[in-house]
Image (cartoon, rainbow, N blue to C red):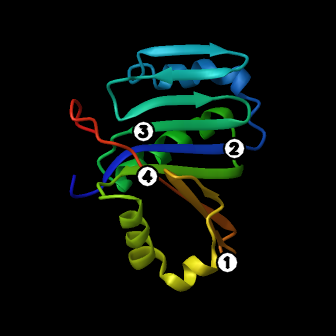
Amino acid sequence: MSSDLLVDAYFQADTIRGYRYLDDAGKIMNHWDSFFPEKSVGLEGLTMANKDAVMRQLRVDTRTIWLNLHLPDSLQQIENLVHETVSGISDIIGVEQFRRIGLRLQYVYGVQNAEHITALLVNNLFGEHWLRANEPTFWTAKAFEFMIPLPADGLNVNLRVSLVRRDPKTSV
């Protein structure tokens, strides 16, 4: 593997006053009915799934709108699908504000070993000064994680790097 592969994207919006979900779950199901063949609804939430689509799963409850996109073509595709879906659901359940919005991306990138990926990150993403100032918050023999605070934007970015072995029987 010589380049990166965007494998999964997970989006979550924590709603403020999303209680209309209880009244409008059927409207959400009707709106996305043809897109998601698998559906489950109850007081604990609505889950809709399509194992053959990029947007694999949509979950909605009184507190959260959550999406899983599998093998998206691009970050632009993620942005478009998330915006369209979250805007549509927000309109249906009357949500105008969010407490938290999060996006987690999972990439697969071929490297030689742990030292190789560490060198790539230090040299290309962060620089040695950044690495000295921001020790990993999580570290094992096969994974490490950094949390990068962006105070001007009020955001925290988490970066987790895990080593995986390629299965010669599959494409990933």
Q: Which residue is under mark 1? A: 152
Dot label at residue 69: 3
Residue 138: where, in percent of width, then height?
63, 56
* Residue type, mark 1 in image: Ala
* Residue type, mark 4 in image: Glu
Q: Is residue 58 above or below residue 159?
A: above
CA separation in Å, label 1 and label 4: 22 Å
Residue 129: where, in percent of width, then height?
55, 85
Q: Quadrant of the C terminus?
A: top left
Residue shown at the point (73%, 17%) measured from the top left: 43
Q: Is residue 110 above or below residue 70?
A: below
Residue 29: where, in percent of width, then height?
53, 20
Q: Which residue is under mark 4? A: 79
Q: Nearer the viewer, mark 1 or mark 4?
A: 1
The one nearer the camera, 33 or 49, is: 49
85 lies left or right of 135: left
Dividing the picture into quadrants, the one containing residue 64 is top right
